[in-house]
Image: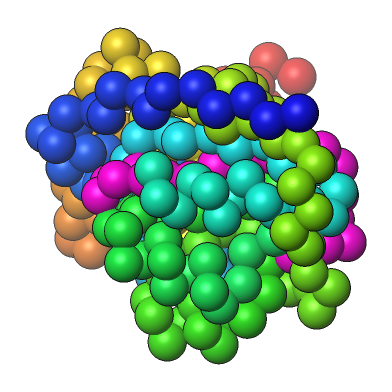
Amino acid sequence: MFIVNPMPQQIAPELVTELEKCEVATIGHVLHSGFVDREIRAVLPGKRVAGTAVTLRIPHADSTLLHYLTAMVRPGDVVVIERCGDTRHACWGGVITNAMKMAGVAAGVIDGPATDFSEIVRVDMPMWCRGPSPITTKLLGLEGAINVPVNVGGQTIAPGDAVLCDESGVVVLAPAAAPSVAARAIAMQEAEIVLLARLAAGEKLPDITGARAMVEQKLQTA
């Protein structure tokens, strides 16, 4: 059977702008949860994209509902796809890439493979997935669900969540928590610039971070 729920409220453009200033790895210094499996990797290098999660669950070889979704998505959406453990069939290829790009979709995140990477590169469609596969899904018309909670890379993602993707991976945040997380990450990145300037001026990293004092205190008490 098919489940098609309404589209979620999009996160504010101002929040998208703030999130796109953040490195996913910096948020990794702030949080321990919310990150999808690191094997879900960027196809295009150097991209950093934030947007609103639009979720899709499609099992096995049936991609009918993904085709249906291309008429629903909006500029700024991040299409997040649960594949129910199927790592054999690529649900996203050249035609879907073009349809999503034309609709203004910010990125795709798939817990499974994609195909037609050359088209993803040509169209400049930000994509995170588990690598390529030549075996594709079909229009079988069997089942699937749009805008339901999904599990992607071990992370539960709800429609309307804030999603941030870059070369280090993908993190998902509740919209209410995202502004404070972004503020902390931006502050850390600004502090890192100061730290690098101190290193360039000749200071040593363990003196700045306190690692030298910690180690030498342990050595003295050993």
Measured as percent of width and height from the top left, residue 3 is found at 63, 25
Residue 191, placed above or below residue 2 = below
| Residue 77 seen in this snapshot | yes
Measured as percent of width and height from the top left, residue 212 is found at 49, 36
Q: How many marks?
A: 0
* Nearer to me, 91 or 42: 91
Q: Residue at x 41, y 17 (%)?
A: 174
Measured as percent of width and height from the top left, residue 1 is found at 76, 28
Q: Residue at x 53, y 48 (%)?
A: 68
Q: Residue at x 25, y 49 (%)?
A: 75
Report whether 76 appears left or right of 209: left
* Nearer to me, 176 or 62: 62
- The image quadrant where one finds the C terminus is top right
| Residue 208 seen in this snapshot | no
Q: Residue at x 42, y 66 (%)?
A: 99
* Nearer to me, 183 or 176: 176
Residue 142, quarter of picture: top right
State the extent of the magenta-drawn residues as a range.
Answer: 73-90
Dominant SS of magenta comes to: loop
Residue 111, placed above or below residue 124 = above
**Which color scheme does this rendered protein use?**
rainbow
Report whether 167 appears left or right of 146: left
> Residue placed farthest to the top in the image?
176
Is 77 magenta? The answer is: yes
Report whether 140 appears left or right of 98: right
Report whether 154 appears left or right of 93: right
Is 213 magenta? The answer is: no
Measured as percent of width and height from the top left, residue 12 is found at 17, 29
